[in-house]
Image (cartoon, rainbow, N blue to C red):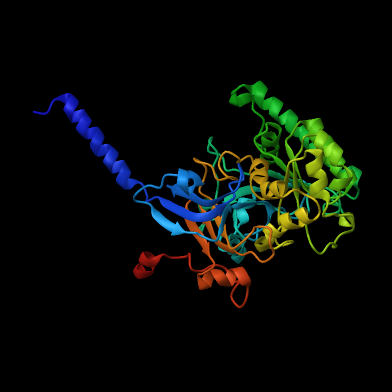
Amino acid sequence: MISDSRFLVSLAVILTAARALAQPTPVAIVGAHVIPINGPEFDNGVLVVQGGKIVSTGPADSTTIPENAQRINASGKILMPGLIDSHSHIGSPAGGDGSSPIQPDVRVLDAINVRDARIQKAQAGGITTANIMPGSGHLLSGQTVYVKLKDGRTIDDLLIHLADGRVAGGMKMANGTNSRRPPPFPGTRAKSAALVREQYVKAEEYRDKIRKAAGDASKMPSRDLNMEGLVEVLDGKRVVQFHTHRHDDILTVLRLANEFHFKVVLHHVSDAWMVAGQIAAAHVPVSLILIDSPGGKLEAKDVSFASAAVLEKAGVLVGFHTDDPITDSRLLLRSAALAVRAGMSREKALYGLTMANARILELQDRIGSLEPGKDADFILLSGDPLSVYTHVMETWVEGAKVFDRSDPKDYLYAVGGYGASHDQDGLIFDDEEKEEQ
């Protein structure tokens, strides 16, 4: 008979071998110029990924490639982390309706078409993670959702789950022109702020009642979905993603955040260059949109390409977004290029497409840079990321290729043409399911 110790050793060897066989084959991207974001750029780089995660990255002469790895030659290309869009409306989301200016109970994930062609176009632009928002026509327009741009069949395939099991997302708020309409919407900026204050006071009171109940069901307040969403904001579990343009509206946002102690990101901020000092003093991040054809609304008349440079100099964390369809998702790289042309540093511009937005979404431990242990989200470019002549050649999400410019179907989404705006239909059935139909 085999002794207990020998049996346990044999069992351990068998289990280890089984786990090794169960692991997907590692993939090594070799030969590219690498922009890791978390450190200096380097030539002739290696990126090893396995099981959806980054295993290692570095120069070829100091990075070990597993013997069984599938090697992909990326010589002549640029390798960098997948882009993160901190404000998007891809998936044709429809949030709140006209019944009220305050709708924090609305969940945008209930209204996203994952086969929307704009998701494929975002992949063609190198975007691997996006904050999908409801619109800005409400003071409180609902809960946003952070998604990975995988080739999914349902929204559940794209959702990012946090360590505590919650779906990752923020709370969309807005002020300025968009939310000012006939009753029941506010007609002035002051009334807009007053309505928001009223709701947060109610949320504080609702939270206090729950705390005082201490688990006693007989003392609990009636469930209120609006208040539940705002309590998550008050408790720091949901970051407010705030649409705002004019300098006075920006300061109103800072005032509200300070008054109710919620975490906030300023979005759009056309007049950011006017109040950069106040934004920096409040330690609030900014998600900028840089459009090359200014116009559309009076409150954005003073928008400036220089905002990114002014904010960088003031010490503000700056990310970029498309607000797709305002800017096409395929053009997010250009936003950083425009910022550099207006005085922002190259380093911070590339950071703004990746790590800054990861921090804005509080996902910096998972995405935003090419570091071991992070999700294997990366892109291969034909040239410098800030060049107008550069194309996204491949986009990978969690170790799976979701866009390949050499594939005629993907190429159509990248350049446009007949069928490029049709919903994705190739994801409905896989080959096995087709045979069963």
The image quadrant of residue 228 is top right
Name the foreground residue: 235 vs 213: 235
Q: Position of residue 234 (x, y in %)?
A: 71, 32
Observer able to see residue 188: yes
Q: Position of residue 313 (x, y in %)?
A: 81, 41
| Vertical side of 129 occupied by 387: above or below | below
Q: Residue at x 48, y 50 (%)?
A: 46
Observer able to see residue 269: no
| Vertical side of 253 occupied by 9: above or below | above
Name the foreground residue: 82 vs 185: 82
The image quadrant of residue 296 is bottom right
Q: Position of residue 208 (x, y in %)?
A: 71, 25
Name the foreground residue: 178 vs 329: 329
Drawn side of residue 190 relative to residue 2, left or right: right
Instruction: Pick out the residue farthest to the front.
Output: 61
Q: Residue at x 77, y 49 (%)?
A: 344
Quadrant for the C terminus in the image = bottom left
Q: Residue at x 29, y 38 (%)?
A: 16
Drawn side of residue 430 relative to residue 84, left or right: left
Q: Position of residue 64 (x, y in %)?
A: 42, 44
Instruction: Pick out the residue farthest to the bottom.
Output: 418
The image quadrant of residue 198 is top right
Quadrant for the N terminus in the image = top left
Drawn side of residue 297 relative to residue 335, left or right: right
Name the foreground residue: 230 vs 48: 48
- Number of callouts: 0
